[in-house]
Amino acid sequence: MSKLLRLFVGIFPSPSTQEQLYKKATNLSQSLQTQVRLLAPKALHLTVKFIGNVDETQLSDLTKTFLKARGNLPSASLQIRQFILFPSRRQPRVLAAEIERSSELGYIFQFFNRGFSDLGIAVDQRSFHPHITVARARRWQQEKIDPAILQLVEPITSVAFVSSQLTSDGAKYTVVSSVRLN
């Protein structure tokens, strides 16, 4: 009997950027009314395409499709601007670092959003709102956060195909494959 794998395509910032985000999120979380659970620095990433739960027998075909990105993605950068309540201030699910939209990130999103459709993965109809989740809470109080400007910019060096296992201590990530950007 095969098992289900929870998969996504993501971009992991450098360890130094992950640490900076974590420290700034820690400081911000102390001013919130809501008690949040901060994600570990190494867990901080931008999800480009959430694939979801798939049978492990599909992993080989999904990996081959992911690897079609090799040599086909533009160079891009993460321009992290501010913390936001996501998806909205009125009904937040997470505290996130907002990433400035760019045509390059949009292209990367569309490449993977459409690329897996031949394998039965649904094309995401929502617009791409790039962000890095930094904290979660079960119940949010009415919050208003100061949109402190972060001004973190770094080139994207690679995109990863990731298996995510949910545990009581948070998600554990295993990189299945990765593709370097031009």
Image: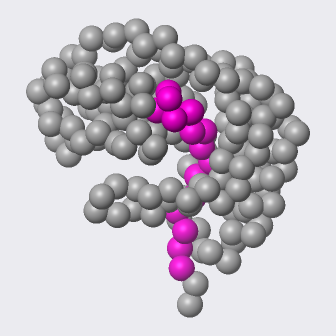
| In magenta stretch: residue 14 | yes
**Location of residue 148 with respect to 19 vertically, above or below:** above
Residue 33: quarter of image: top left
Q: Residue at x 20, y 46 (%)?
A: 138
Q: Residue at x 71, y 44 (%)?
A: 112
Q: Residue at x 76, y 53 (%)?
A: 66
Residue 128: quarter of image: top right
Residue 126 in sight from this viewpoint: no
**Location of residue 156 with respect to 173 vertically, above or below:** above
- Image quarter in which the N terminus is found: bottom right
- Judge by depth and name the residue closer to the eye, 17 or 131: 17
Q: Residue at x 66, y 47 (%)?
A: 160
The x, y position of residue 145, in whole percent, is 25, 16
Q: Which residue sits furthest front? A: 16
Is 136 placed left or right of 10 in the picture? left
| In magenta stretch: residue 143 | no
- Image quarter in which the C terminus is found: top right
- What stretch of residues is rendered in magenta? 3-18
